Amino acid sequence: PLENAVFFARLVQRVITLLTTPTASGVLYEVDMRLRPSGSSGLLVSSLEAFARYQREEAWTWEHQALVRARPVAGDESLANGFEAIRREILCRPRDTASLRDEVRHMRERMWCEHARKKPGRFDLKRDPGGITDIEFMVQYAVLAHAASHPELVEWTDNIRLLEALAHAGVLETDRAERLAGIYREFRDHLHHRHLAGKGADVARERFAEASGFVRQIWRDLMGAPAFSGRDDCKNRGED
């Protein structure tokens, strides 16, 4: 008989193959297993105990950001409950807000520098400053910064209800949270329609200039620094 680790590793490989097989309608899901604990050098599967130990002792801040959105989608009730307990424990840890802000901001800037493909007059709904990723990073930062004193923040994993919870907890002003949620819905809806039509994420900049400007303003207020805007930012940080 196969050991559990071998059996489940093979099972995961088969599931990944099924999820990423090209079809006439495209690929069902994009699965990036490099984002698992310990990256490409880590095991495809781990026990709950190993996962908890990794999150407590080795995980980077961006991995805790990912936990904000994480939820169990398969397995029995005991597995789901075990995962949720670990998730809640990690997210509700007290954190140094200044250090956390710096780490989240640095990761966002690094992503921008690695993926920026600036086109004159165009706005990337997902990656550009003032877009979807900025909203997601601000929400993740706010949850990590305040979940220790407001554990109700970890009840949700979707950005819309997280924004509502942040407003209810007094972390964000209600009108600002509602505006961010509306912009997030609008950007996501437009991006989904473009993907279904086989188009990219970039649109005419003026179309969403007001909305993206509002997101950048919230970024400045919450993250304590202006939003980065060009390749010169990457060069100044030694990222290019």
Image (tube, helix red, strand yellow):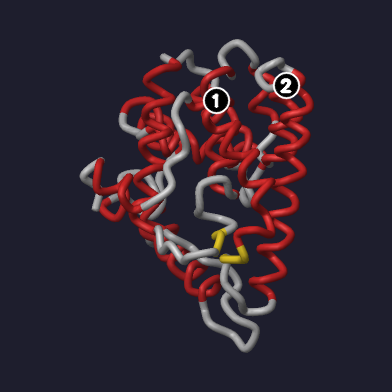
Q: Residue at x 62, y 65 (%)?
A: 204
User: Quick check: 192 above or below 36?
Assistant: below
In this picture, residue 108 sits left or right of residue 28:
left
Q: Residue at x 60, y 59 (%)?
A: 205
- The percent position of residue 147, horizontal first and vertical second, equals 59, 19
In the picture as drawn, the residue positioned furthest to the top comes out as 149
Question: 86 or 203, which is in the foreground?
Answer: 203
Question: 152 or 173, which is in the foreground?
Answer: 173
Q: Residue at x 54, y 30 (%)?
A: 87
- The percent position of residue 54, horizontal first and vertical second, equals 36, 33
Q: Which residue is mark 1?
A: 222
In this picture, residue 164 sits left or right of residue 139:
right
Question: 72 or 198, which is in the foreground?
Answer: 198
Identity, as a three-letter code, of the amino acid under mark 1: Leu
* Rendered image: mark on residue 31: none
In the picture as drawn, the residue positioned furthest to the left comes out as 238
Identity, as a three-letter code, of the amino acid under mark 2: Glu
Q: Helix, strand, or loop for circle 2?
A: loop
Q: Which residue is mark 2?
A: 173
In this picture, residue 39 sits left or right of residue 48:
left
Whether residues under marks 2 and 1 lie with C-beta atoms below 8 angstroms apart, the answer is: no
Q: Earlier in the sequence, mark 2 or mark 1?
A: 2
Q: Residue at x 21, y 44 (%)?
A: 238
Q: Helix, strand, or loop for circle 1?
A: helix
Q: Is residue 13 visible?
A: yes
* Quadrant assignment, res 154: top right
